[in-house]
Image (tube, rainbow, N blue to C red):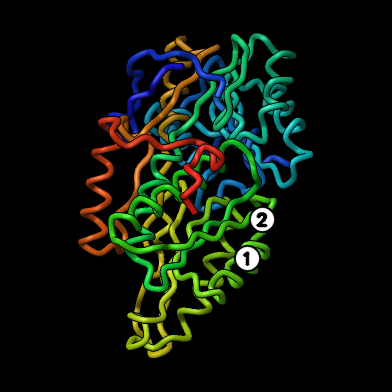
Amino acid sequence: MKKAKLFTASALALGTIVALAACGNSGGNTTDSSKGAAGGKTDAEHSVAIVTDIGGVDDRSFNQSAWEGLQEWGKENKIERGVGGYDYLQSDDASQYTTNLDSAVSNGFQTIFGIGYLLADPITAAAQANPDVNFGIIDSVLEGDNIVSATFADHEASYLAGVAAAYTTKTNKVGFIGGEEGPVIDRFEAGFRLGVHDAAKELGKEIDVTEEYAASFGDPAKGKSLAAAMYQGDVDVIFHASGGTGAGVFQEAKALNQELNEADLESDKVWVIGVDSDQDAEGAYKTKDGKDDNFTLCSTLKEVGAAIKDISNRAMEDKFPGGEHLEYTLKDGGVELTEGYLTDDAKTAVSKVKDGIKDGSIEIPETPDELAKDVK
């Protein structure tokens, strides 16, 4: 595997080489290049498309980050949106993955990304059928000379989220809501649970973690019902790693918090920790007595957009990293945690463990099964 180093949120470069670890419908208009920047151009030999997961490019999370990164790439290189430039194809259902990949190929895009591990099999099939086209997969590791795999150390950012939750909870009960079970969300759960456990130990108290899965990344109603049950059970901080399903978690938190007066916030407010991008805006609301407030405690960041830009730039330079696995970590700037509304004590604790993760003194497993038996 190659470690990708993130120098800024928009510029990525390779770091040191480490051992390889195995660890529908088009939403874009692929025929109208008028959507490009003024004075833009097309470059058919280096055109780029992304095929989304079912969350879509407005999910305020994973897919949106990828699309924003691709748009930045187009703007920086003065490339127009459309055939011969860049675009996205939105998947409203898993059955559209293969169709959308085929459409991207038939429209002549030369580098095509599948956004999310659920597209792993369709990407593999498309890459085998089209050896002269570059393919990228986010959050999975695939074999193939014309496939680049990009993964992120989500367990590291999630550990920070666990510390933040532990320093915030007043009920000593926190929750985790995942989308679909699998290796990627395993990393989120494992990191979060260990972060809560270690911070609770530092604080000298016990904190219970409740985990639930929605079995979907695109079911806000299920996210809302899971969050409602947790909040009713005295959980006061929920970390979601569920894509579009997380919209329902925010809806439930808003419904509860907007029934509180300002004086009640100290004791009764509930929080959400966002995922993949800064979800601060999702937590904005007014209390019952009209106070502007926010319940997005903080958000884990995953620089999917920066990875898309990095790989697209390599392809433009005819240096597409086919056959490689790029890993983006906390140390490289590939994952992070926003400060949000953390207390000073929480910020200090998060900063301390960041240093530990970066220097290797804190080791975080990637699956819940690897956690010590005493980690709840």
Whether residue 38 is visible here, answered yes or no, is no
Query: In the figure, 197 relative to 144: above or below?
Result: below
Vertical order, 109 against 374 (above or below): above
Residue occupying the point 41% across, 25% down:
310
How far apart are labels 2 and 1 at the CA level?
Answer: 8 Å
Q: Horizontal and vertical percent for residue 56?
A: 61, 47
Instruction: Work out which residue is located at the far front of the displayed protein and give it.
Output: 374
For disc 1, the marked residue is: 226
Which type of secondary structure does the marked residue at label 1 adopt? helix
Q: Is residue 109 at all visible to an observer of this figure? A: yes
As shown in the figure, which amino acid type bears the numbered disc 2? Ala
How many C-alpha atoms fall within 10 Å of the one at disc 1: few (<14), some, or many (≥20)? many
Secondary element at image label 2: loop
Query: Considering depth in this image, is 325 or 93 the residue closer to the camera?
Result: 325
Position of 281 compared to 254: left or right?
Answer: left
Report the residue marked by disc 2: 214
Badge 2 vs badge 1, beta-carbon distance below 8 Å: yes
Label 2: how many Cα within 10 Å (few below 14, some 14–19, many 20+): many
At 48% from the left and 16% from the top, the residue drawn is 315
For badge 1, the amino acid type reads: Leu
Return the x and y of residue 248 as percentages of the image width and height.
59, 65
- Residue 166, position in %: x, y? 36, 60
Residue 87 vertical placement versus 288 (above, below): above
Q: Residue at x 59, y 17 (%)?
A: 147
- Disc with the residue nearer the chain's start (2 vs 1): 2
